[in-house]
Image: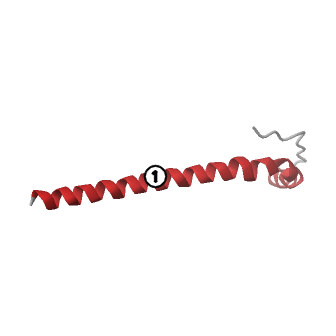
Amino acid sequence: MATAAFRWARAAVKVAFALIVGGWSLLLIAWLTLHWGILPQAPQWRPQIEQRASKALGIPVHIGSIEVR
């Protein structure tokens, strides 16, 4: 009986480890996509950002520059 419980606990640990590694992997992929795929393009979106901000605020909005680090 102790062997069956040990096998079940071992399987539960493996599943938990796989979920943790999978979750961290997804977070890493999301961060890399944001860091190297999306943020470097932000200066190109300045006109659209200004237009939407002006519309939302009801006053003209001008953005001098956008820096991404």
Please give left or right for residue 19 compared with residue 39 in the image.
left
Instruction: List the residue tagged with mark 1.
Output: 21
Tell me how the rendering is colored.
secondary structure
What is the x, y in percent for residue 48? 86, 55
Quadrant for the C terminus, please. Answer: top right
Q: Secondary structure at mark 1?
A: helix
Q: Toward the viewer: 10 or 63?
A: 10
Residue 54, visible in the rendered structure: no
Q: Residue 52's image quarter?
A: bottom right
Residue 44, visible in the rendered structure: yes
Identify the residue at image location x=13%, y=58%: 3
Identify the residue at image location x=88%, y=42%: 63
Q: Is residue 44 above or below residue 4?
A: above
Q: Residues within 10 Å of mark 1 (few under 14, many from 20)?
A: few
Q: Count of labels shown?
A: 1
Instruction: Kindly give the residue lying farthest to the left in the view shown.
Output: 1
What is the x, y in percent for residue 1? 9, 61
What is the x, y in percent for residue 34? 69, 50
Q: Toward the viewer: 27 or 11?
A: 11
What amino acid is found at the position of numbered circle 1 in the picture? Val
Q: Toward the viewer: 17 or 31?
A: 17
What is the x, y in percent for residue 14? 33, 56
